[in-house]
Image: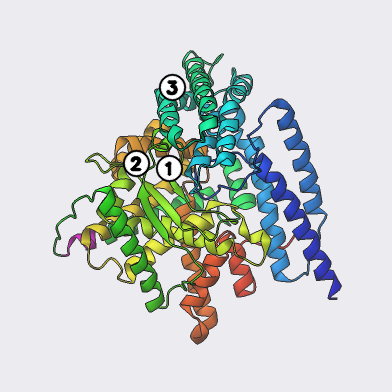
């Protein structure tokens, strides 16, 4: 009996290592910070026809290998790991067959070229010769990468996505020139000439790509939603969420109504003056103080353990070389599995009177960002230490974003924002936004809402600025399933918590529950439920093969 689980564990872990080694080469670069992974030193994305063919062949091999492992009747931890790995493999099929960003989304190739430069520069590492050579290697690969983009996109690119890409690249030559100029003093002297040449060629290639898109890219197609059936398959097979799209719309309506009701109740309290915007230097200092206070609050209230080995989530001024291309991703470094000795950092733009929605909230009270992005840092830093290597990787945003969003409301209810009614109003505004994101995400995916309607809906219902709303709508249309992850994940956690309290009774311990939740924060919530509570309840996801 003891040898069977051991053999199962070895086979699952071996397949997991093979999958994630391959995924480090194949996984598309993303603007999101949570899915960032460590890549081989000489890595550049490859979306050529030959590479796509090899990805499909390898995917079939992985699917067959996964199905060949029979975990029926095995220990629940192995059943969970098997389901977890299955969801990662299903994500690749969803990307290649449903989303097809390599064929439909022009901005995809901006991410796979200049976006890779962003990822190299956002890391808190000295710009030594090795790192400088990596930057040059990626810059040199931009022109060939965009040649592949033209081959894949011609006559296939979706018009609204092309419009977004053209807008993003409007000043790209100037931005790359500023990037190179700011990088030069930190670059090794012997490589500065190569930097000038490589950056100039990259800027020219990106500008030419923009102009090709603006001229029609050989014919543009209308945007087509993925459809309700594909979204339902994503929920079942990738996110492992046991709900239909219709269920999620009902959840969104209920949660939005609740957020509105809480906001109305909050408005009855005596008004407090709005904090003025801090400048960056003061904001950096205040953020460090608030982060330390947040950690003390967790410990004092018995909410979440704060190990001494856990780094801090800090803020810093935006580096000059990062600012020109800061639109290419979340401007933070959450570190990685091999850099657990480093603190996480959020890079801040200069404080102005017209900051976007989230940056303005942070400039008034950095706790609004610490309560969410700071949680991402802590959760990932804890998950990267997980003794089970399969649970150290990102699988789907519902767990990660759900934990961060859940933390916001938990801290609100625990009284952490009791000294600031404007900040409480901000947290409640975030609640309205995340509920609305579910509706926008689902209705865009099923074709019930256009991009323009989604933008206008967010502007009026959150409310938020037009620019941020347009970015959100375009992102959700291109990445169905991402927008709903915040609310769906949080609701799953709240239900998980309630069932744990009911099941464990007097033995329930909030700190222990949260410690497990954060450590397993890359694992879909339904799998965590099965493992902790010993089985799925009525209407729950079944993970038996």
Read off the residue under disc 1: 440
What residue is pinned by disc 2? Answer: 458
Helix, strand or loop: magenta stretch: helix
- Tell me which corner region of the image, top left, top right, bottom left or bottom right, holds residue 152: top right
Residue pointed to by mark 3: 173
In the image, residue 27 sits, relative to residue 523, either above or below, namely above
**Could you tell me how far apart the alpha carbons at marks 1 and 3 are, in whole angstroms?**
34 Å
* Mark toward the start of the polypeptide (3 vs 2): 3
Q: Nearer the viewer, residue 158 or 198?
A: 198
Sequence-wise first label, 1 or 2: 1
Which residue is nearer to you in this view: 393 or 141? 141
Residue 41: where, in percent of width, then height?
64, 41
| Left or right: where 252 falls relative to 105 | left
Give left or right: position of 299 versus 198: left
Q: Which residues are magenta?
A: 264-269
Q: How is the image coloured?
A: rainbow
- Tell me, yes or no, if residue 301 can be seen here: no
Q: What residue is shown at x 52% (from left), y 48% (from top)?
A: 245
Quadrant for the N terminus in the image:
bottom right
């Amino acid at each position: 009996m003891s040898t069977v689980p051991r053999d199962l564990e070895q086979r699952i872990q071996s397949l997991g290592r093979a999958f994630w080694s391959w995924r480090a080469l194949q996984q598309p670069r993303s603007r999101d910070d949570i899915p960032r992974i460590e890549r081989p030193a000489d890595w550049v994305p490859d979306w050529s026809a030959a590479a796509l063919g090899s990805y499909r062949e390898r995917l079939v091999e992985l699917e067959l290998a996964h199905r060949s492992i029979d975990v029926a009747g095995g220990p629940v931890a192995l059943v969970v790991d098997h389901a977890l790995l299955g969801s990662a493999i299903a994500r690749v099929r969803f990307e290649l067959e449903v989303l097809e960003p390599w064929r439909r989304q022009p901005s995809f190739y901006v991410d796979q070229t200049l976006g890779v430069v962003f990822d190299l520069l956002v890391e808190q590492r000295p710009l030594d010769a090795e790192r400088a050579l990596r930057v040059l290697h990626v810059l040199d690969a931009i022109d060939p990468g965009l040649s592949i983009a033209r081959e894949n996109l011609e006559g296939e690119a979706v018009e609204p996505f092309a419009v977004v890409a053209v807008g993003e690249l409007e000043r790209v030559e100037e931005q790359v020139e500023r990037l190179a100029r700011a990088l030069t003093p930190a670059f090794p002297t012997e490589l500065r000439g190569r930097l000038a040449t490589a950056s100039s060629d990259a800027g020219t290639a990106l500008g030419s790509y923009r102009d090709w898109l603006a001229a029609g890219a050989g014919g543009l197609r209308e945007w087509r939603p993925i459809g309700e059936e594909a979204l339902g398959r994503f929920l079942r097979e990738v996110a492992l969420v046991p709900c239909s799209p219709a269920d999620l719309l009902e959840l969104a309506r209920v949660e939005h109504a609740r957020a509105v009701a809480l906001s109305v109740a909050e408005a009855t309290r005596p008004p407090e003056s709005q904090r003025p915007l801090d400048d960056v230097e003061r904001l950096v200092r205040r953020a460090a103080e608030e982060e330390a206070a947040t950690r003390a609050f967790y410990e004092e209230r018995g909410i979440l353990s704060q190990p001494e080995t856990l780094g801090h989530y800090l803020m810093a001024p935006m580096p000059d070389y990062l600012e020109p291309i800061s639109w290419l991703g979340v401007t933070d470094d959450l570190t990685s599995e091999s850099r657990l000795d480093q603190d996480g950092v959020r890079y801040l733009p200069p404080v102005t009177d017209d900051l976007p929605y989230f940056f303005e909230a942070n400039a008034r009270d950095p706790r609004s960002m610490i309560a969410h992005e700071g949680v991402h840092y802590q959760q990932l830093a804890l998950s990267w230490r997980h003794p089970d290597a399969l649970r150290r990787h990102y699988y789907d945003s519902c767990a990660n974003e759900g934990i961060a969003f859940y933390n916001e409301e938990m801290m609100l209810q625990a009284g952490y924002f009791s000294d600031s009614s404007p900040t409480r109003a901000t947290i409640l505004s975030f609640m309205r936004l995340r509920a609305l994101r579910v509706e926008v995400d689902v209705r865009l995916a099923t074709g019930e809402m256009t991009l323009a309607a989604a933008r206008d809906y967010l502007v009026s219902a959150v409310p938020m600025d037009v620019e941020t709303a347009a970015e959100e709508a375009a992102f959700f249309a291109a990445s169905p399933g991402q927008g709903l992850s915040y609310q769906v994940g949080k609701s799953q956690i709240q239900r998980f918590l309630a069932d744990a309290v009911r099941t464990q009774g007097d033995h329930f311990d909030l700190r222990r529950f949260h410690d497990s939740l954060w450590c397993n924060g890359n694992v879909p919530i339904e799998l965590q439920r099965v493992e902790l509570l010993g089985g799925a309840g009525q209407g729950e996801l079944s993970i038996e093969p």
